[in-house]
């Protein structure tokens, strides 16, 4: 019985997470980037890979938020460490736009985030 309750809870949370991500996608398609950011940021903080990628994109392109290559790099670094190839691609792209101190700061932020979310 406990196992059934646990499985039900996990499924409920997964559906809620997917719903929030999809709400963000709909907002993004409407070019309502602030709403997309609001939907995706909590998911990214929880470790949702697709949300982390999208938050990186919003920061990289300055969509709905001030353009911030350091924050974008942080999210791509986290994805790269998870084995997501797109993370490496965008890290390389951003490195052309920022200085070594900014790269170090972004990597430090990412490592701190990863340590908190082990």
Image: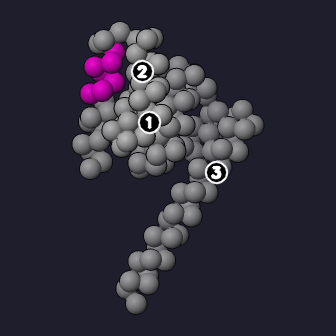
In the image, is residue 104 part of the stretch drawn in magenta?
Answer: yes
Q: Quadrant of the N terminus?
A: bottom left
* Residue at 44% in and 84% down: 4
Mark 2 or mark 3, which is nearer to you?
Answer: 2
Quadrant position of residue 2: bottom left
Q: Give the image location of residue 10, x and y in percent.
A: 45, 70
Q: Which residue lies under the disc numbered 3?
A: 22
For residue 92, the mark is: 2
Q: CA distance from mark 2 to mark 3?
A: 28 Å
Image spot of residue 78 (x, y percent) = 36, 37
Give the mark nearer the N terminus: 3 vs 1.
3
Q: Secondary structure at mark 3?
A: helix
Protein image colouring = one colour
Check disc 3: other Cα within 10 Å, few if <14, some if 14-19, many if 20+.
some
Residue under the point 30% across and 27% down:
107
Helix, strand or loop status at disc 2: helix
Q: Judge the density around disc 1: few (<14), some (14-19), many (≥20) Cα neighbours within 10 Å.
A: few
Residue where numbered disc 1 is placed: 85
Q: Which residues are magenta?
A: 102-108
Frontmost of labels 3 and 1 is: 1
């Amino acid at each position: 019985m406990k196992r059934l309750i646990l499985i039900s809870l996990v499924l409920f949370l997964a559906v809620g997470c997917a719903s929030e991500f999809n709400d963000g996608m709909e907002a993004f398609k409407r070019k309502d980037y602030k709403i997309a950011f609001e939907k995706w940021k909590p998911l990214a903080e929880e470790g949702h890979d697709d949300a982390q990628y999208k938050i990186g994109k919003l920061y990289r392109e300055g969509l709905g938020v001030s353009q911030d290559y350091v924050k974008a790099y942080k999210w791509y670094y986290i994805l790269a460490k998870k084995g997501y190839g797109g993370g490496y691609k965008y890290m390389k792209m951003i490195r052309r736009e920022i200085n070594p101190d900014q790269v170090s700061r972004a990597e430090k932020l990412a490592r701190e985030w990863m340590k908190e979310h082990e």
